[in-house]
């Protein structure tokens, strides 16, 4: 139904059923013209480019993101090339070297997992990771852990990257946070523009991190944070974009920060990804492709896919080896776990030879669903 919008990526890789959009979504055709427009605008505006980008393009994409998340103040949104930069900038709001108590889960993506384990090596950082399994009891165990201590930082995904299972949203645990200065972040990378998300109740208190590489379909370079404005953050890892208004003033004395999301900004950045993402946002608006409609389309694909698995009756990939905790709020990929990492890698390789692209993480095989799939496509899947 939507394949025609992805004709270039589909034609570049004919005969491949791409079931790894959760890793890297194909880019719709309109993003190509957007990329060229960036070049043309760079020529047209040259020295005035940054003024144009920050007065026209940045607000347009901020507003598009704000619309998707139901955030009323788009100026709370700040961009960065990747989410790691934003999360480390937030961590640098703590006085350097002070003891920290951090609460997280055992299913966070490498950016935070690696960074937090490295922080722990300082010796005065306590890192508590709550096991996400069993999923059925996670919400309760997480709520208890949140309320059990005066944490300096709480970090949790919206949808776990290694299962597709949706985590409890802050309304289920935020009330238990003991201290007002706790830094709270939700990694929305697998939720944004996939699972319908109303962030309006949390904009004051919780950072939301995401990027357009996956369900935003705009490739790398357009990550963002919705920055809560309850506290005036002063990250130590700061770039000059964090205070545009003062650039003409004498640069001496205490460092000042813009009183909106830009306080968390870095420095010179390639904004061509914003052009690509803006074109996707415009396309969605024209087609009225809201996250809810996209999610409904993907849910139908997931049902068709499970039907195909029932027909195939495979011992490895089936409803019993699927990791889930209720499929209505599940992310846009399925994860199957069985046997060993070697067995999973072998099956992924075999599928790839048969024209089905998936990906795997250790002993988990992931199948993702995209707007450029039709339900009939899954008839191509075979495990023989
Ligand atoms: C849950 C999650 N967070 C973040 C990222 C990307 O992190 P970064 O922007 O730091 O490269 C990914 C990428 O796959 C992810 O799955």
Image (cartoon, helix red, strand yellow):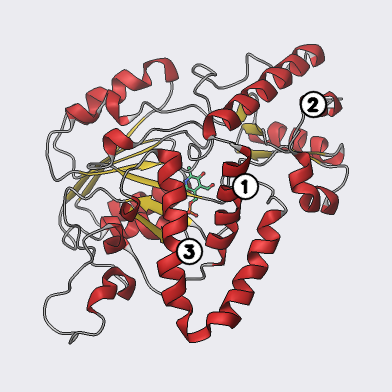
Q: Nearer the viewer, mark 3 or mark 2?
A: 3
Please tell me whether mark 1 sits on a helix, a strand or a loop. helix
Residue 88: image quadrant is bottom left
Residue at image mark 3: 57
- In this picture, residue 104 sits left or right of residue 107: left
Residue 171 image-quadrant placement: top left
Question: In the figure, 384 relative to 208: above or below?
Answer: above
In the structure shown, which secondary structural element does the residue marked by tag 2 occupy? helix
Mark 1 crowdedness (10 Å alpha carbons): few <14, some 14-19, many ≥20:
some
Label annotation for residue 378? 2
Q: In front: 277, or 356?
A: 277
Can residue 114 be seen in this snapshot? no
- How many marks the image carries: the answer is 3
Name which of mark 1 and mark 3 comes first in the sequence: 3
Quarter of the figure with the N terminus: top right
**Can you say whether 314 is above or below 211 in the image?**
above
Tell me the crowding category of disc 3: few under 14, some 14 to 19, or many 20 or more residues within 10 angstroms, Cα based.
some
Residue 105: percent from the left, percent from the top?
A: 36, 35
- For the point 19% across and 84% down, the residue is 249
| SS at circle 3 | helix
Q: Earlier in the sequence, mark 3 or mark 2?
A: 3
Q: Residue at x 63, y 69 (%)?
A: 37
- The CA distance from mark 1 to mark 3 is 16 Å
Position above or below: 7 against 381: below
> Ligand 1: does it lie within 8 Å of the C-beta at label 3?
no
Q: Is residue 129 left or right of residue 245?
A: right
C-alpha span from label 3 to label 2: 39 Å
Asked whether the beta carbons under mark 1 and mark 2 sit within 8 Å of each other, the answer is: no
Which residue in the structure is indicated by mark 1?
Answer: 283
- Residue at the spot 81% in from the left edge and 47% down from the top edge: 10
Q: Position of residue 24 (x, y in %)?
A: 64, 48
């Amino acid at each position: 139904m939507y394949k025609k919008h992805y004709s270039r990526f589909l034609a570049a890789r004919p005969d491949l059923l791409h079931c790894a959009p959760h890793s890297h979504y194909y880019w719709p055709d309109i993003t190509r013209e957007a990329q060229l427009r960036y070049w043309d605008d760079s020529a047209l505006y040259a020295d005035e480019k940054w003024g144009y980008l920050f007065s026209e393009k940045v607000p347009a994409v901020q507003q598009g993101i704000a619309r998707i998340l139901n955030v009323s103040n788009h100026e709370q949104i700040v961009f960065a090339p990747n989410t790691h930069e934003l999360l480390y900038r937030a961590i640098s709001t703590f006085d350097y070297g002070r003891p920290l108590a951090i609460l997280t889960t055992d299913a966070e993506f490498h950016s935070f997992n690696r960074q937090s384990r490295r922080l722990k090596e300082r010796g005065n950082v306590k890192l508590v990771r709550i096991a996400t399994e069993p999923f059925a009891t996670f919400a309760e165990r997480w709520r208890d852990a949140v309320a059990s201590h005066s944490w300096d930082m709480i970090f949790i995904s919206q949808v776990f990257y290694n299962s597709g299972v949706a985590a409890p949203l802050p309304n289920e645990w935020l009330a238990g946070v003991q201290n007002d200065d706790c830094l709270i972040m939700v990694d929305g990378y697998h939720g944004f523009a996939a699972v319908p998300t109303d962030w309006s109740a949390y904009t004051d208190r919780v950072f939301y991190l995401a990027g357009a590489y996956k369900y935003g379909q705009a490739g790398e370079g357009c990550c963002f944070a919705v920055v809560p404005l309850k506290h005036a953050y002063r990250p130590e890892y700061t770039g000059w974009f964090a205070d545009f208004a003062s650039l003409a003033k004498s640069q001496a004395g205490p460092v000042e920060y813009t009183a909106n999301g830009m306080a968390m900004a870095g420095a010179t950045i390639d904004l061509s990804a914003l052009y690509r993402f803006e074109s996707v946002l415009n396309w969605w608006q024209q087609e009225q492709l809201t996250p809810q409609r996209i999610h409904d389309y993907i849910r139908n694909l997931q049902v068709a896919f499970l039907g195909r698995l029932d027909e195939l009756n495979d011992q490895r990939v089936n409803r019993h080896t699927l990791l889930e905790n209720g499929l209505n709020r599940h992310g846009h990929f399925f994860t199957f776990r069985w046997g060993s990492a070697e067995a999973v890698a072998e099956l992924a390789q075999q599928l790839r030879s048969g024209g089905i692209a998936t990906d795997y993480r250790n002993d988990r095989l992931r199948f993702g669903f995209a707007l450029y799939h039709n339900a009939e496509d899954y008839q191509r899947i075979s495990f023989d």
